[in-house]
Amino acid sequence: MTSSSRRTNFIVLGLLPALLIYSVFVIIPIFWSAYYGFFDWKGIGEAKFNGFDNYVEALKDPIFWLALKNNLIVVAASVFGQVPIALVLALVLRKSNFFQRFIRSAVFMPMVLSSVVVGIIWSYIYHPQIGILNFLLEAVGLESWKKAWLSDKSVSMLALTVPIIWNYIGPYLIMFIAALQNIPSDIDDAAMIDGATGSRKLFSVTLPMIWDTVKVTIVLCISGSLKAFDLIYVMTGGGPAHSTELLASYMYNNTFSVYRFGYGSAISTLIIIISLVLIAGSQRLMRRNQAV
């Protein structure tokens, strides 16, 4: 057996336990959930096959489409909020002195906190009577802008995008800093010799060199946004009047509140399908833009 074959076998053996665990706890449950999406099942007792009835009911339910619209708002806020902010911060904080390390830690800190804690913090910030946001608006003479941010249907969903963006900038910041630090110094030197500085260097040299990392962050943003649940559930529970309902909370309420496990399984399958479509579309678009 050659050294290359031994190395390959060692890698396969090393990955096998993780692959088995991932298959048992992720891959198999996905197919199991898709299977139960074709049944009328309350979690106990006999599961009655009903074909595509659960999927048809979901697609006819206006709350499902409202939840999908809200999820797309979260996706847009994540992609156009978290990624650009994280990239700008990475460009500013790419060096490793004490001050920049401190700022990195501060930006990453929300990710360390529990989503329940983050939800409680922002609930107090948005509180109509004791919230700091309304207090600041009043202090700067913008009292007319004061709102009940989480109970006003016209602004509640947009208000929730702010803590979502704030909470998840940290991981993308670390990814971008790692990508920027892996750019060979020779390329930076060549760009300076050619006169590429500032924005020209950013768009002609830096971004193309870390484009694969950007695509990974977009995938993580989309997949994470479509399964967003805990933060919004703590802050609003999907209300008022379903104005902040997301697909994950819609699935949770139908599964565990009214015990429609078959219907909830169908919703979870639809979430996976929508996620795959959005991810495939974004990757195709980014490949096309890169080619141009």
Image (spheres, grey):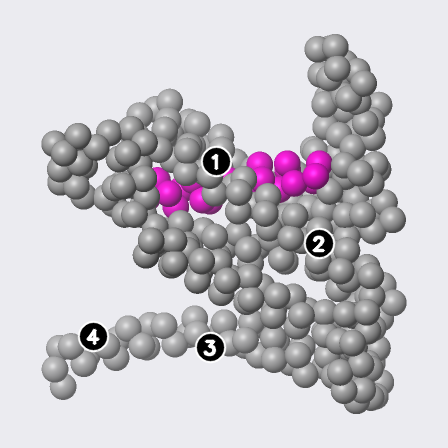
Say whether disc 2 or disc 3 marks the residue closer to the N-terminus. 3
Residue 198: give x, y in percent of width and height: 29, 28
Answer whether residue 125 is magenta in the image: no
Q: Which residue is mark 3?
A: 20
Whether label 4 touches label 2, CB < 8 Å? no
Say whether disc 2 or disc 1 marks the residue closer to the N-terminus. 2
Helix, strand or loop for disc 4: helix
Q: Can residue 237 be seen at all in this image of the molecule?
A: no
Q: What distance separates the C-alpha of mark 2 from that of mark 1?
A: 24 Å
Q: Which residue is mark 4?
A: 7
Circle 1 packing at 10 Å, graded few (<14), some (14-19), many (20+), is some
Q: What distance separates the C-alpha of mark 3 from that of mark 1?
A: 37 Å
Q: What distance separates the C-alpha of mark 2 from that of mark 3?
A: 36 Å
Q: Residue at x 65, y 45 (%)?
A: 115
Question: In this rendering, would 112 be left or right of 9?
Answer: right
Say whether disc 1 or disc 4 marks the residue closer to the N-terminus. 4
Q: Residue at x 78, y 70 (%)?
A: 58
Circle 3 packing at 10 Å, graded few (<14), some (14-19), many (20+), is few
Q: Which residue is mark 1?
A: 85
Helix, strand or loop for disc 3: helix
Residue 274, by quadrant, is bottom right
Whether label 4 touches label 3, CB < 8 Å? no
How many marks can you see? 4
Q: What distance separates the C-alpha of mark 4 from that of mark 2?
A: 48 Å
Q: Residue at x 49, y 65 (%)?
A: 280
Circle 4 packing at 10 Å, graded few (<14), some (14-19), many (20+), is few
Say whether disc 4 or disc 2 marks the residue closer to the N-terminus. 4
Q: Nearer the viewer, residue 175 or 64?
A: 64
Query: Which amino acid type corresponds to the residue marked 2 in the rendered image?
Result: Lys
| Rendered position, 245 above or below 52 | above
Q: Which residues are magenta?
A: 158-178
